[in-house]
Image (tube, grey):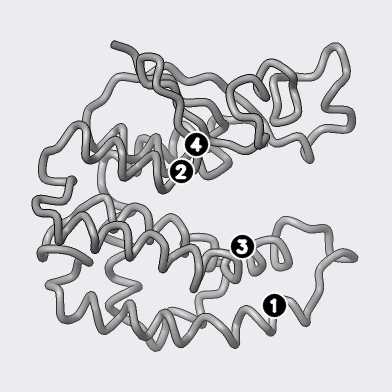
Amino acid sequence: MTLTIYGCYRSRASRTVWLANELGIPFDHVPVVQAYRLADPLAADAPLNTRSPAFLKINPNGHIPSIDDDGFVLHESLAINLYLARKHGGPVAPETVQEEGLAAMWSLWAVTECEQYALNLMVHRAVNPPEKRDPAVVAASLAALPKPFAVLDRTLADGGGYLIGKRFTVADINVAEAIRYAMLAPELFEPVPHVREWLQRLHARPAFVAMWAARDAEPA
């Protein structure tokens, strides 16, 4: 049985690679880059990308990551992680149906409450060239994130430093990866010390360090 992860490390595929490392799952990695990074994604010499016909046969939505787990194809990074944790078990996986519900809840919470604002901060503080950065977008994100960050901080304080069962689980990976983009705004983390310390602990884990090293080695 072979797990194949489609995507590049400089994308949401990073969270699936991190989890696979935590679970000790061997996998094949097929690099797929975002089409917007290419001058002509449909050029004959273009690398495999999210608009390539070959990749659209895998994921017709044209997004990364996707996985092929011995013939079972799945999209959406957070759903992929919940699936892999459920399949392979171990301490990273939810132990009860209630914990499964909490893992799903926190994953959806991260998307609805935090991720887009965090992404906007990254894009308009670092990714976009200065002339394309919008201070209003940055201000809106800085205004929106303190409330959910305070919720997360209280949860971590009450939960022994983790989201579920007082231990590290897939829920921590999914939420941490959704808010990682906001780390370009350190002022957001000053009022939430439990969130700041939680991220530091998670990013010191060998599985994350290995993923990040592969990310750093990938062409920008």
Quadrant of the frame with the N terminus: top left
| Camera-nearest residue between 169 and 9 | 169
Residue 10: % across, % down? 57, 40
Verify CB contact (< 8 Å) between mark 1 and mark 4: no
Label 1 vs label 4, nearer the camera: 4
Q: Is residue 210 above or below residue 105?
A: above
**Disc 4 target residue:** 75
- Is 38 on the left-hand or right-hand side of 215? right
Disc 1/disc 4 C-alpha distance (Å): 29 Å
| Residue that carries the numbered disc 2 in the rendered image | 77
Q: Which of the two residues, 84 or 187, is positioned nearer the viewer here?
A: 84
Q: Amino acid at mark 1?
A: Val
Query: Earlier along the polypeptide chain: callout 1 or callout 3?
Result: 3
- Percent across and percent down for residue 48 are 69, 20
Q: Nearer the viewer, residue 213 or 161?
A: 161
- Name which of mark 1 and mark 4 comes first in the sequence: 4
Q: Residue 93's x, y, as percent?
A: 17, 46
Q: Which residue does the numbered mark 1 point to in the structure image? A: 138
For badge 4, the amino acid type reads His
Secondary structure category for the residue under label 4: strand
The residue at 29%/33% (across/down) is 21
Name the residue rendered at 26%, 41% in the picture.
Answer: 206
How far is disc 3 from disc 2 in space, using C-alphas?
Answer: 15 Å
**Spatial distance from mark 2 to mark 1, Cα to Cα?**
25 Å
Q: Earlier in the sequence, mark 3 or mark 2?
A: 2
The local secondary structure at tag 2 comes to helix
Residue holding disc 3: 119
